[in-house]
Amino acid sequence: MTPILTTALTIGGAGLACGGLLALAAKFLAVKEDPRIEEINGILPGANCGGCGYAGCAAYAEAVLLKGAPINLCAPGGAEVLGHLADITGETAKVAEHKVAVVLCGGDVSHAPRKFDYNGVADCRAAHATGGGDKSCSFGCLGYASCSHACPVGAIEMVNGIAKVHRDLCISCGSCIRTCPRHLIKMVPYARTIHVMCSSKDKGPAVKKACKVGCIGCTICTKLAENESIKMAGFLAVVDYEKDLDSDAVIEKCPGKCIVRI
Amino acid sequence: MSELAIVSSSPHAHSGSSVQRIMLDVIIALVPAMAAATYAFGWDAIRLISACVLACVASEGVSRKWMGRDLGVEDLSAVITGILLAFNLPPSLPTWMAVVGSVFAIVICKQLFGGIGYNPFNPALAGRVMLLISFPVFMTTWSTWGIPAPLAVDAITTATPLGLVKTAIATTGELPFTFNGATALQLFVGNQNGCIGEVSAAALLLGGLYMLVRRCISWHIPVAYLGTVTLFSAILWLHHPQQNLNPGFHLLAGGLMLGAIFMATDMVTSPVTKRGMLVFGAGCGLLTMLVRKWGGYPEGVSFAILLMNAVTPLINRATRPRVFGAVKKKKA
Amino acid sequence: MGASTANFRAPGGIHPAYHKDLAAEQPIAEMPLPAMLVVSMSQHLGKPAEPTVKKGDTVLRGQVIGEAAGFISAAVHAPTSGTVKLVAAVATAAGPRATAITIVPDGEDTWVEGITPCPGWQTLDKKAIAEKIAAAGITGMGGAGFPTHVKVSPPPEAEIDTLILNGAECEPYLTADYRLMIEHAARIWEGALIIAKALEATTIRVAIEDNKPQAIAAMQDAIPAEAKDAQVVVLKTEYPQGAEKQQIFAITGREVPCGGLPLNVGIVVENVGTTLAVWEAVVNGLPLTERVTTVTGGPIATPGNVKARLGTSYADLVEFCGGTSGTISKIISGGPMMGFAQPDLACGTTKTTSGLLLLGPDAVQAYESMPCISCGRCVGVCPMKLMPNELSQFLEAEDYETAEAYNVMDCIECGCCAFECPAHRPLVQHMRRGKAQVMLIRRKQAS
């Protein structure tokens, strides 16, 4: 019996001693933290999308309490999270307008061909930096899915070689916008559904050569759209998302077939 | 131009090397040792090598498909794992055990970690150690079956030479045999008992030479490994020649040559810097000798290399080269 | 006095197949004026030049058509006389678009007025020399295209003691600098004396790899009597011996600090082509309007070294060299190690177009990249002693902070790592993207 007893006592004793040390450490080395930080962190969606400008939800929670960050920065959380944050902090803020991302390019593989055979890293930024990108149009979606990979909620799908945002899944964090080397993705109000699906700054003939559904700068839509809600920016028609636009005429009359309702 | 020009980032030239070519070179380098194994153990060597290779390639193919990886088995790395695992098995091992070891090596130790390039441990060695722990009796039974008659007369048989030494020291406190030119030659040409791949130091060295020429390995790991073993055993031997065999024996016996030339040099699981390779090789040598001298097993090559595999990332980090230009900046 | 050999050996390096025999023995051939010239405003490192002409203007050869836009920038001159047909953004050889001026030559090739030769340059002070170089719009003609007038006017505390003329031309296929050294050794030496005067440097070294004995002999024979401490240094043939920092180390044993410039160790390196351009600019008063480009590669009918006006389209260069035969798989502006692949032959030459290389299907290896097998070859060949294997993995995971901590910014994009990589990983592309991203982050933090 003695060896068993000795063993049990030794191991048990060692265990007790270690446990005691851990307990002491937990007590004396504990980091003092405002319990509300943990509470806010629990309320935030936990997508860690970075849309608020902080490195994840925990950082934002800390910033709200310690650095006085505005409480309406969490786009994915919307009104619900804002309400909770207002309760905890006692601050008030207006709910930010519900916005969704849209990729302003409609030149999929059937409309805009490749101009060379790209061989390299399958990433839009890398492709863009190599020979200026392999798409015939130097402004269009390259289709290497960098935005789709960056999206924390899987709201961007690659369809026929270009990115499409599922607007009802989008949490408006803006991660995709930061990855697109061609700056094609815009955050637009959810209520606005008519878009010029082209971002080419080229002149009409060059656009036509590169893509079958590009904006050729004909300006027809700017005349049809109510209260100047589509304006020309150089050779490109651009929707002014601040204004209402709900005209089917602009869609039908666009010779480039690049104005669509999503 | 009808066909589109290829556009890629520079450089637009390549040395022409490929992973497949490296693997093929390693396989070619293993041929002499396979021949020696077949000569020494006959049918058993062929049986085990083919069983391991087939099992490895099959499980690699199946698991890659199953895990949805787009790479196939054409990089030949599974073939090497198969051969090396077989080299680490005793000739009398049942085929089914070899197959179990192969599947473990490929599926658990390689594919589950992410496939080629991502495995932290040498799959063949991990497979062998799994078998050694699971089936200790089978893994340490050394049959003399198959050793050609002319060589069997003086062959050091029935147990591995290292096993003999370990048992003798433990029981009688004396060396079981003396190590002289004749025994050295026996060990060198392949007339010893042991795992099928470790019999002939000569065949292994020949393969190592080929790999050096083809740049599949650099000299750093084998030299550091063998050098440390030599140094360590020389100190022991000079200190106490009655209890310790001389360095020549330690170099030629057991799995050291196989380990130093083929296992420790596995690219994936060894350091990338030259200094790191030296540290890695020295660590392997030290651990091998510790096990051989004081450990529970007669041979420590597998354990030594696996343990060093575990610290490879650490070695890489510690031996990061000083960046060219990392000097104090003179004010401009 | 014979040529001396390099004292030190820079780390890393590779031995690619050189293929220099294709064009090495072809004397420099002057190309007649093409039907059109597309002159980019982005011919150099730094800010593109500002166009000073518009559509319909007539220009004379040597007339400024683009003004330097800032400190690190250089003027661009009309390569011949003619009419401006278009001012518009076109793709540059490196990819991004930049404004370019399209000129239709009138065939007269009339020089602008006010060209003032200055054979007695010895009387000029260093400021005057730098001004003449700036007025001629000279930039580094070896690769990066750093404006030369900036290089020759170092801050006073830099104390430059050595001028190195880079004649290594370590890029495979290219032979333009080689031909220049053989055909214009004396002028290059005089150009070197001019630059040395501007720098107040007492020592001049000409670096040439040992696979170019003819160039070594030519430069050796032409060492001017008035040069106090001038030598030809023979470098071991190895890529990248032409890389500035490695070359400085090979010759002097001085290590340019990370993020620093050669002037931090008292050295300025000039390409031999640039040096010749400096001679033209100071002695003859001529701005930079043409350069020698090696047109080479398997599909080119008669490879050669062509002196062509800036803005000559690649298609015209190829035609001058007898056109092509067989399939063209890759079109490269520059050499195979650091050049830029082109989608077509539309681009025009610039001050940095050292070569136009066409590769057939046999010479093109596609990247079908595999996971890294940690062979360590990239670590062994990296001339900056970086660990490209690790860095590329950090960058793949978009961990720019760690990549920066492990010196991704010191990568010179020489391509040794990717050349050696058995897994065919696009290491340089990862580095390029990583460097761009780190720059972006740094700029964001600074603002």
Image (cartoon, coloured by chain):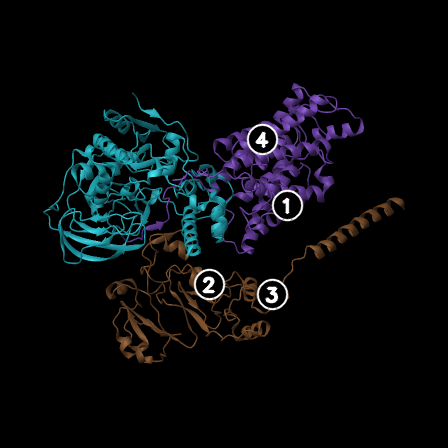
Compare residues C119 and B122 and report the one nearer the observer.
C119
Could you say which chain is coloured brown in the image? A
The residue located at (28%, 77%) in the rendering is: A253
Q: Is residue B256 above or below residue A51?
A: above
The residue located at (66%, 19%) in the rendering is: B182
Question: For the residue marked with disc 2, what is the amino acid?
Answer: Ser
Q: Quadrant of the N terminus of chain C?
A: top left
- The residue identified by callout 3 is A37
- The residue identified by callout 4 is B224
- The residue identified by callout 1 is B99
Q: Does label 1 lie on the same chain as label 4?
A: yes
In the image: residue C27, left or right of residue C160: left
SS of the residue under disc 2: helix
Q: CA distance from mark 3 to mark 1?
A: 55 Å
Q: Closer to the observer: label 4 or label 3?
A: 3
- The residue identified by callout 2 is A175
Question: For the residue marked with disc 4, what is the amino acid?
Answer: Ala
